[in-house]
Image (cartoon, grey):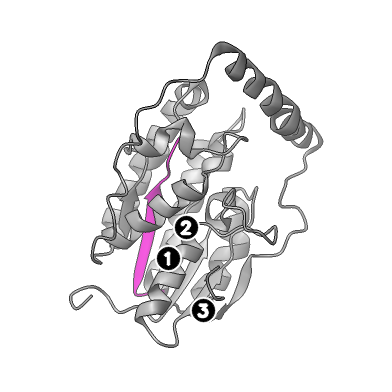
Amino acid sequence: MDSAPDFRSFVALGDSFTEGMSDLMPDGTYRGWADLLAHRFARHRAGFMYANLAVRGKLMHQIAEEQVPAAAAMGADLVTLVGGLNDVLRPRCDMDRVCGLLERSVATLAPACKHLVLMRSPARRGPVLERYRGRLDQLFAFIDDLAARHGATVVDLYASVPLGDPRLWADDRLHLTAEGHRRVAEAVWQRLGYEVGFAWDEALPVTAPPGWYARRGADVRFARQHLLPWIGRRLTGRSSGDGRPPKRPDLAPPVAEE
């Protein structure tokens, strides 16, 4: 820790990935990589403060308009910004607009904090990834350029083969499991220069793939429980985050770990 930055406060911005879905806790709330990271900072720094403004379903314009100004006003030492994926995964996406919103957000946040972290988000391997790979590549190349111009740090999770393993993704196929979030927290921790806790990019053990009937059953459950409701929200212009407040709207000590 001697040569690593001494952060006293941390604000996380974004959507469901940063809110912590689907790292479900016994009380029905979500934990996630940002909470795990905050708890780790708090163990090393007395009086550490943490806010998490992320809300599931938010598009990049909502993050830029609702979360960025609030985060900039907090003056935190560390800020993480992860957004744009919900835009990219929609049938129609104005990539120029998304990139412009990202650029505006970074230009606001970088001078307002000591250290800004951006991410090349993880992606589950499969047909959805291949369908949107061109957009993802464009988004992440732009993020690399933004970071270089504004002195931000990029955590590259997109290149991680293990984080693309379907076994690290929840049944909705959109959000990481608890183990996936644990690996992301460790990846950010190490990228910031702290001591290695474990090999976050280590491959999962080799296991026999599920059989045909198991795969088809999983596909049916996914369609019924997750895909059809998602389509319904898109058709009606609703979002899973409508009316939902930020996870932790103010800087405060992290709650005790479970």
Task: Classify mark 2: helix, strand or loop.
Answer: helix
At which x and y percent is residue 87?
A: 57, 40
Q: Are marks 1 and 2 in contact (CB under 8 Å)?
A: yes
Q: Nearer the viewer, residue 98 or 212?
A: 212
State the residue at coordinates (71%, 64%). 245
Spatial CA span between label 3 and label 2: 21 Å
Q: Is residue 29 left or right of residue 174?
A: right
Amino acid type assigned to the residue bearing label 3 in the image? Met
The magenta region covers: 113-123
Residue 124 in sight from this viewpoint: no
Q: Nearer the viewer, residue 153 or 208?
A: 208
Examine the structure image and report whether residue 120 is included in the region drawn in magenta: yes
Callout 3 environment at 10 Å: few (<14), some (14 to 19), or many (20+)? some
Q: Which residue is mark 3?
A: 74
Compared to residue 207, the image places residue 240 above or below, namely below
At which x and y percent is residue 191?
A: 27, 58
Spatial CA span between label 3 and label 1: 19 Å
Callout 1 environment at 10 Å: few (<14), some (14 to 19), or many (20+)? many
Amino acid type assigned to the residue bearing label 2 in the image? Trp
Task: Classify mark 1: helix, strand or loop.
Answer: helix
Quadrant for the N terminus in the image: bottom left
State the residue at coordinates (46%, 51%). 181
